[in-house]
Image (cartoon, rainbow, N blue to C red):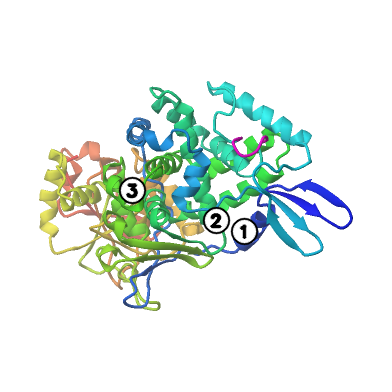
C-alpha cells in the first residue's frame, strides 16, 4: 500500500511497506500462550470442549502421491489458473479478501485517506533496496527454469513489496516441495503459473487466518478443518505463529538472503509432510467452492488417515466437512461451528468443562494395552478395509479378549485410532523417572524396528494409570518388543525351543525400576 501525504502548503510523498502496522498488531496479539482446546459449536447446546492429543505428526504423504494429486488438480482447474485473472486476484476472490495494495493520499489537515484514481502514480521512485530485491527475485526465477516475473509478484507494483514479499517468502519456505510441484506441472505450458496460483492461495489464506480473531467461513473454513486433519492442531498453531513472524521479517528484509532465511525458518516450522499437505489443499482450493472442495477431499492421498486423525485432533468427521459453517481462531483456541452430524461420535476427549474424560479413568482388570500392529488391524477392520493374512490371524487371536477394554498409548493414538481409547500415565514424559525407564529399554534394544517410538510405547505402559493392585497389560505382536522384553525378564528367546508367544500363551511379567507389567505376546508377525 502506498500513501501520499498531503499537507498545506507543502505536499510530501512517501512509500510505506504494505501492512507494516497491521503485521505488528497481529504479531503482538498472537504472542500470548497458545491453548490447544477445540470447541465444537453445533448451536444446539453449549460448545463441547475437546482436548487434542499432543505430539501429533502430520499425515505422511509420499512424493509420488503428492505430485499425482496436484497434477490431477491442475488438469481439472487449468482454466481457473490461467490468464487473464492474475493469481493474486484469483486468491483474494477465492477467500473473499479485499485487495491490500493501492495508492492513497493522506490529508494531514482532515486526517483522511482517499484512494487515488487508476493511472495516478506516486512521485517517489523505487528505493535501491526494492530495486535490488526485485532484481534478485528475477534471477531466482531464472534458477528455477523460468524468466522474468515467474510467480506473478509484480503485476500490481513494479518492485517486490507487500504481498509479493510474503508470497516469495512462502515459496522459499516451500522449497522442500517446490521442485516436486514444478515436476508435477512439467507437462503444462507454464508450470510456474500453477505454482504461482498455489503459493498465492497459501499466502492469502495464511494472511486471512492470522488476522486478530479471524472467523473463516465457506471455502476457508472447510480448508482450515481439512488442514487441521492433515497436520494436527499443534502444527496448525505453528503455521499461524510462524507466518506472523515471516511477515514481519519479510517486511524488514533488505536483501534476498534476508528473505531466503525468513522463508527457510518458516519451512522448518512447516516440515515436509505439512508442506505437501498445505500445497495439496491449496491446489484443490484454486478455482473451487466450499462444496467443491468437500467433494474432492475424499479422493486425496492420506484422506483415510486424516479422517481418523480429524476425530482425535479436532473432534469432527472429515467426511462431513461440507457441514462446517465456520472456524474461529483466538488466543484461547479454535472454535468450529458445525452441524450435529459432523461431530465425531467416536472421538475421545469431548466433555463439558470439569467432567471426567474416559481417557482419564485408571485402567482396571479388564483393560489391555495394545501395540500399533493391533491398532492398525482393528482400525482396518472397523473401516471395512482388506486385511493382510497376518492381520487376520492377529484379530483371530485377539478374539479371546473380546470383552476387554482395549487401550492404546497416546504415542501412537494420534496416527488414527477411531476404535480405541487412549490411557493416561502417572508422570511427565520429560521426568527423570520416565527417562530412566527409556534408557533401560534402549540398553536392551527394545523396539529394534521403530526404535524410540516403540520404546516410548512400552515406557507408557510401565507408567499407565491403573486402579490399585492392577498391573498394566501389554498385548503386542511386535517381535522387536516381546523378544527383548522376554530377555529382560530372564527368558532367552533363542533357548526356549519355541516362539515367545507359544512359550508364554498367558504372558510373562517384566520389571523395570520397581515397576512391573504383564506382556501378552501374539503370533502372526
Q: Estimate the x, y position of residue 201 in percent, counting from the top left.
A: 48, 44
Residue 460: % across, % down: 37, 57
Q: Is residue 502 visible?
A: no
Which residue is depicted at the point 56% across and 40% down? 167
- Magenta range is 154-159
Report how far apart the C-alphas of labels 1 and 2 lie in the structure.
7 Å
Residue 269 horizontal side relative to residue 289, left or right: right
* Mark in front: 2 vs 3: 3
Mark 1–mark 2 CB contact (< 8 Å)? yes
Q: Residues within 10 Å of mark 1 (few under 14, many from 20)?
A: many
Does the magenta-highlighted stretch encompass residue 78? no
Q: Residues within 10 Å of mark 3 (few under 14, many from 20)?
A: many
Q: Mark 1 or mark 2: which comes first in sequence?
A: 1
Can residue 386 be seen at all in this image of the molecule? yes
Percent x, y for residue 479? Answer: 25, 41
- Residue 508 vertical position relative to residue 151 in the rendered view, above or below: below
Spatial separation of the CA atoms under disc 3 and disc 1? 28 Å
**Badge nearest the viewer, 3 or 1:** 3
Q: Which residue is mark 1?
A: 26
Identify the residue at image location x=15%, y=46%. 394
**Is 158 within the magenta?**
yes
Q: Secondary structure at mark 3?
A: helix
**Horizontally, is 205 left or right of 298 in the view?**
right
Mark 3 and mark 1 in contact? Answer it, CB < 8 Å.
Answer: no
Residue 210 marker: 2
Q: Main secondary structure of the magenta part?
A: loop
Mark-to-mark CA distance, 2 and 3: 22 Å
> Label 3, on which residue?
293
Callout 2: SS: helix
Tell me whether circle 2 and circle 3 mark residues in contact (CB < 8 Å): no
Q: Position of residue 137 (x, y in %)?
A: 63, 30
Amino acid at each position: 500500500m502506498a500513501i501520499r501525504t498531503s499537507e498545506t502548503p507543502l505536499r510530501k510523498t512517501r512509500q510505506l511497506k504494505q501492512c507494516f502496522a497491521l503485521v505488528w498488531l497481529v504479531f503482538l496479539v498472537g504472542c500470548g500462550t497458545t491453548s490447544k482446546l477445540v470447541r465444537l459449536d453445533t448451536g444446539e447446546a453449549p460448545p463441547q470442549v475437546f482436548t487434542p492429543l499432543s505430539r501429533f505428526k502430520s499425515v505422511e504423504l509420499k512424493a509420488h502421491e503428492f505430485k499425482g494429486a496436484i497434477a490431477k488438480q491442475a488438469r481439472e482447474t487449468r482454466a481457473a489458473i490461467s490468464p487473464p485473472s492474475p493469481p493474486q486476484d484469483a486468491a483474494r476472490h477465492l477467500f473473499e479478501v479485499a485487495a491490500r495494495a493501492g495508492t492513497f493520499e493522506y490529508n494531514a489537515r482532515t486526517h483522511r485517506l482517499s484512494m487515488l484514481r487508476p493511472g495516478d502514480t506516486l512521485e517517489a521512485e523505487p528505493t535501491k533496496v526494492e530495486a535490488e530485491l526485485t532484481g534478485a527475485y528475477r534471477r531466482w526465477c531464472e534458477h528455477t527454469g523460468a524468466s522474468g516475473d515467474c510467480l506473478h509478484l509484480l503485476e500490481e507494483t513494479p518492485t517486490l513489496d507487500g504481498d509479493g514479499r510474503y508470497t516469495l517468502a512462502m515459496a522459499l519456505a516451500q522449497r522442500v516441495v517446490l521442485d516436486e510441484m514444478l515436476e508435477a506441472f512439467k507437462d503444462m505450458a507454464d508450470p510456474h503459473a500453477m505454482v504461482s496460483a498455489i503459493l498465492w492461495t497459501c499466502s492469502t489464506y495464511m494472511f486471512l487466518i492470522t488476522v486478530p480473531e479471524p472467523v473463516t467461513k465457506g471455502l476457508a473454513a472447510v480448508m482450515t478443518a481439512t488442514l487441521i486433519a492433515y497436520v494436527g492442531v499443534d502444527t496448525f498453531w505453528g503455521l499461524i505463529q510462524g507466518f506472523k513472524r515471516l511477515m514481519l521479517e519479510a517486511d524488514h528484509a533488505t536483501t534476498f538472503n534476508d528473505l531466503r532465511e525468513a522463508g527457510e525458518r518458516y519451512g522448518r516450522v512447516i516440515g515436509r509432510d505439512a508442506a505437501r499437505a498445505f500445497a495439496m489443499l491449496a491446489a484443490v482450493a484454486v478455482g473451487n467452492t466450499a462444496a467443491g472442495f468437500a467433494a474432492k477431499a475424499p479422493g486425496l492421498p492420506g484422506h483415510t488417515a486424516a479422517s481418523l486423525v480429524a476425530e482425535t485432533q479436532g473432534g469432527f468427521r472429515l467426511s462431513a466437512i461440507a457441514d462446517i459453517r465456520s472456524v474461529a481462531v483466538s488466543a484461547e483456541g479454535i472454535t468450529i461451528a458445525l452441524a450435529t452430524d459432523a461431530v465425531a461420535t467416536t472421538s475421545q476427549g469431548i466433555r463439558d468443562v470439569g467432567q471426567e474424560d474416559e481417557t482419564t479413568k485408571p485402567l482396571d482388570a479388564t483393560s489391555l494395552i495394545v501395540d500399533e500392529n493391533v491398532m492398525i488391524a482393528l482400525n482396518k477392520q472397523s473401516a471395512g478395509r482388506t486385511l493382510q493374512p497376518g492381520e487376520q490371524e492377529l484379530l483371530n487371536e485377539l478374539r479371546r479378549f473380546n470383552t476387554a477394554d482395549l487401550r492404546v498409548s497416546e504415542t501412537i493414538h494420534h496416527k488414527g485410532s477411531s476404535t480405541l481409547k487412549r490411557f493416561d500415565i502417572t508422570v511427565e514424559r520429560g521426568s527423570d523417572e520416565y527417562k530412566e525407564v527409556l534408557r533401560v529399554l534402549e540398553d536392551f534394544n527394545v523396539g529394534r524396528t521403530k526404535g524410540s517410538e516403540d520404546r516410548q510405547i512400552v515406557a507408557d505402559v510401565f507408567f499407565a494409570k491403573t486402579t490399585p493392585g492392577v498391573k498394566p497389560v501389554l498385548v503386542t505382536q511386535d517381535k522387536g518388543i516381546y523378544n527383548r522384553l522376554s530377555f529382560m525378564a530372564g527368558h532367552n528367546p533363542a533357548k526356549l525351543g519355541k516362539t515367545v508367544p507359544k512359550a508364554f500363551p498367558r504372558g510373562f511379567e517384566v520389571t523395570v525400576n520397581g515397576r512391573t507389567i504383564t506382556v501378552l505376546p501374539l503370533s502372526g508377525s
